[in-house]
Image: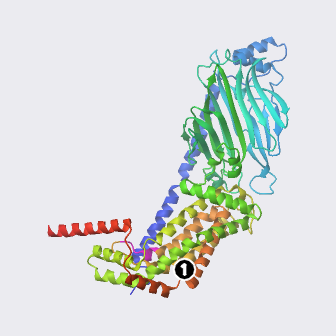
């Protein structure tokens, strides 16, 4: 009689499996000592950087504008700034800013350094819809752009410390801001910003003119771009998970710098763009003339999500600006905007590759099916309803595969008594038992792999959904039922304490998804156990299924509590529909009596010719059997 309860070994197995999973998750969490050490490390690095700046006698101090006709002060400036002393004599040599904006962006550029000190997205709000706080990718000195200028008189000047002269013009509807760091009336380093109407892309050109006697061209100039990414979303930990440096190099290949830990770096070559990507917003520097080398660095600023709530990562990119005929000339562009797949793709610069839609077949499923289908649905129905309709369509498309899988299980269930009989008959000869079992399958016209293949086909779609929903910008700050933001967790209650791996809140959609997957596995586990008899020497699948009935919902509950509500809603509806489809198939489509009659009829027919795989498997078993007999004779 088959055992009805889990034995002691099964309980131990369950505890071990769950323990291993918890241990793996625990290993990815920094300890209190590690957090303290990292904070101490950051403080030490900051202190060392400050000391280095104070001791760096080669780097010029902040210039002070010379008064008109003050030859003494001008001479003093020439001692520190050399040829660029001229820039400090101009009216622009003061703390001043120029603002350019269109329907999408508002940019503020400083005279000092000539770079963007504020970049505001005018259509998006931070943290929560209705907060009134716009998303600011650059603000409060969180970013800088610097060119280290190696002069012919052996000075090292930093462009971020020098004053540029602004000139704002308009050509058609385009706003053009020219910032020039001057060494003379017609000798300068120029940044040119070109802002078109209703666009997130900003033209950005860097060129020099007549500086061959001022700047040494013996080696390329280093362009250093720094950015500390501000938090923009509800969950700082969830946002930080998807914040990283992405880049394109070589022949349109893309990669990223690890987004976990301190001091992560890469040194790729021939870069065509660098993206400081956050979860739903990104800043990209692209160039028509690739950077030959680079040094990309990333530091995680969220060591404790209860304390580190303002910024997520600190990024730095160092790239060389090569001279051509003694001058610098690069045509580049800045992108300040949402990490929206369709929008990024529209620029035809491969920007969309920074969206993590998955590799291989998973990425193709997302790009060719999920993205266009969901985009179409969301264009005319509310986003929560769009997720439900999207899920229904995907599950209906998969229903023939579900049907074939269940039909295979039903056939195996009918054959189980005969397979059990063969197991008893050849108990002492496992090889013979396997051979006879394969003969029975072939004679009955049953493929034991038919139940696995449909399930394997569905796996890529399931994994693709885990990539698609967290990356779906459309869900940001879109509400549905009790969820105020489908891109973040749908908290219905705040806990007065923190549960390890679970969090300090309760999300409802993950609970519903866990309940649905529990009933689905409960519904199907009996048929799977009946269909697949235990093979000698193999794990007891029946007991493993009993364990998984409880482990899977539990893991769903733990992992998805802090994930986006859109993904949890998809999984809940998906399992609910699968339960419905399985119920209909089991009770109204599949007839066990007809299946039994068909199998008996198949047995009377001449067995089908074995496939090459079955023939090869049969040959291997026969060879093993022959080798076994030969060893016994010896």
Q: In which image quadrant can residue 107 be found?
A: top right
Q: Is residue 582 visible?
A: yes
Stretch in magenta: 538-544
Up-down relation of residue 302 to residue 550 (above or below): above
Up-down relation of residue 149 to residue 629 (above or below): above
Q: Is residue 500 visible?
A: no
Which one is nearer the viewer's eye here, 113 or 304? 113
Residue lying at 66% horizontally and 61% vertically, measured from the top left? 564
Q: In which image quadrant can residue 392 be found?
A: bottom right
Which one is nearer the viewer's eye here, 241 or 357? 357
Which one is nearer the viewer's eye here, 481 or 269? 269
Q: Residue 44 location in percent, x, y? A: 58, 38
Tell me the quadrant of the picture where the C terminus can be found: bottom left
Q: Residue 274 location in percent, x, y? A: 63, 40
Instruction: Farthest residue to the front: give it.
Output: 606
Residue lying at 67% horizontally and 51% vertically, measured from the top left? 341
Location of mark 1 (residue): 523
- Decide whether residue 510 is among the magenta residues: no
């Amino acid at each position: 009689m088959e055992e009805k309860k889990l034995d002691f070994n099964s309980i131990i197995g369950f505890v071990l499996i769950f323990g291993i999973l918890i241990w793996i998750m625990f290993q990815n969490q920094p300890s209190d000592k590690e957090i303290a050490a990292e904070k101490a490390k950051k403080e030490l690095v900051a202190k060392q950087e400050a000391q280095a700046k104070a001791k760096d006698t080669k780097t010029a101090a902040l210039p002070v504008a010379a008064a008109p006709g003050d030859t003494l002060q001008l001479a003093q400036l020439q001692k520190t700034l050399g040829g660029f002393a001229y820039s400090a004599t101009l009216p622009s040599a003061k703390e001043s800013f120029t603002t350019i904006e269109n329907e999408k962006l508002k940019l503020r550029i400083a005279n000092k350094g000539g770079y963007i000190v504020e970049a505001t997205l005018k259509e998006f709000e931070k943290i929560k819809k209705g907060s009134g706080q716009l998303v600011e990718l650059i603000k409060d000195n969180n970013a800088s752009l610097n060119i280290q200028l190696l002069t012919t008189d052996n000075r090292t000047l930093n462009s971020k410390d020098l004053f540029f002269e602004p000139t704002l013009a308009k050509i058609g509807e385009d706003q053009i801001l020219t910032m020039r760091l001057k060494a003379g009336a017609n000798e300068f380093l120029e940044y040119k910003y070109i802002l078109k109407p209703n666009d997130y892309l900003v033209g950005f050109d860097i060129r020099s003119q007549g500086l061959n006697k001022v700047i040494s061209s013996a080696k390329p100039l280093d362009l250093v771009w720094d950015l500390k990414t501000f938090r923009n979303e509800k969950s700082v930990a969830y946002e930080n998970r998807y914040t990283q440096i992405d880049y394109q190099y070589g022949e349109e290949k893309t990669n990223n710098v690890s987004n976990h830990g301190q001091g992560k770096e890469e040194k790729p070559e021939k870069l065509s763009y660098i993206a400081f990507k956050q979860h739903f917003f990104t800043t990209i520097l692209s160039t028509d003339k690739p950077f030959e080398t680079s040094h990309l660095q990333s530091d995680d600023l969220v060591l404790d999500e209860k304390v580190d709530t303002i910024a997520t990562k600190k990024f730095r990119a160092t790239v060389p600006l090569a001279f051509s005929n003694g001058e610098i000339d690069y045509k580049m562009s800045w992108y300040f905007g949402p990490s929206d797949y369709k929008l990024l793709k529209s620029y035809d610069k491969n920007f969309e590759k920074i969206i993590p839609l998955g590799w291989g077949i998973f990425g193709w499923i997302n790009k060719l099916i999920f993205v266009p289908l969901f985009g179409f649905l969301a264009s005319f129905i509310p986003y929560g309803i769009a997720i439900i309709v999207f899920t229904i369509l995907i599950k209906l498309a998969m229903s023939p595969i579900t049907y074939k899988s269940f039909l295979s299980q039903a056939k195996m269930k009918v054959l189980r008594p005969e397979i059990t009989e063969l197991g008893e008959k050849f108990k002492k000869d496992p090889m013979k038992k396997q051979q006879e079992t394969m003969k029975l399958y072939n004679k009955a016209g049953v493929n034991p792999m038919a139940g696995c293949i449909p399930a394997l086909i569905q796996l890529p779609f399931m994994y693709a959904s885990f990539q698609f929903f967290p990356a779906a910008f459309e869900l940001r700050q879109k509400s549905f039922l009790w969820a105020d933001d489908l891109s973040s967790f749908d908290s219905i209650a705040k806990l007065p304490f923190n549960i390890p791996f679970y969090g300090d809140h309760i999300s409802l959609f993950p609970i519903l998804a866990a309940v649905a997957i529990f009933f689905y596995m409960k519904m199907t586990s009996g048929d799977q156990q009946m269909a697949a008899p235990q093979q000698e020497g193999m794990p007891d699948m029946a007991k493993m299924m009993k364990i998984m009935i409880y482990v899977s919902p539990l893991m769903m509950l733990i992992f998805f509590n802090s994930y986006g509500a859109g993904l949890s809603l998809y999984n809940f509806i998906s399992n609910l529909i699968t339960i419905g489809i399985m119920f209909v198939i089991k009770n109204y489509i599949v007839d066990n009596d007809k299946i039994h009659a068909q199998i008996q009829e198949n047995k009377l027919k001449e067995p089908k010719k074995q496939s090459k795989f079955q023939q090869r498997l049969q040959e291997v078993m026969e060879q093993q059997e022959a080798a076994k007999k030969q060893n016994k004779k010896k």
